[in-house]
Image (cartoon, helix red, strand yellow):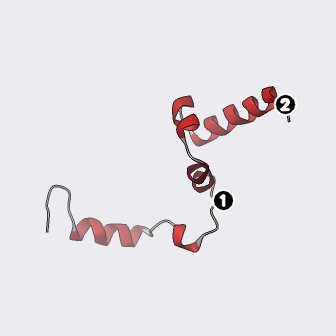
Amino acid sequence: MTFTAAARVAARLAATLGWSPDAFWAATPAELRLALGLDLDPAAVPAAAADLARLKEAFPDGQAR
């Protein structure tokens, strides 16, 4: 792949993710894998909506326990 082709792929990828060029170029390979859904580590699976709701209820913003 040429540099020009790689730059085009990177630009398309950034646009697909909705990231600014600065955000794209600052991202780590791990962040790109996760954003693209390529991280196969089961521990990296996002929390379910119900789990997040329970955490928000248990720890509302601005209140420490």
Where residue 33 sits in the image (x, y, percent)?
63, 54
Identify residue type, mark 1: Leu
Question: Would you say 58 lies left or right of 64 here?
Answer: right
Q: Residues within 10 Å of mark 1 (few under 14, many from 20)?
A: few
Task: Look at the picture and state if 36 lies above or below 3.
Answer: below
Residue that appears at 53% across and 37% down: 26
Q: Mark 2 packing: few (<14 Cα in 10 Å), some, or many (20+)? A: few
**Image coords of residue 7 (percent x, y):** 73, 30
Return the residue at label 2: 2
- Looking at the rendered image, the quarter that the C terminus falls into is bottom left
The image shows residue 63 at horizontal and vertical percentages of: 13, 60
Name the quarter where the N terminus is drawn.
Answer: top right
* Gap between marks 1 and 2 measured at Cα: 24 Å
Image mark for residue 38: 1
Image height check: is 6 above or below 49? above
For the point 22% across and 71% down, which residue is it?
58
The residue that appears at 67% across and 31% down in the rendered structure is 11
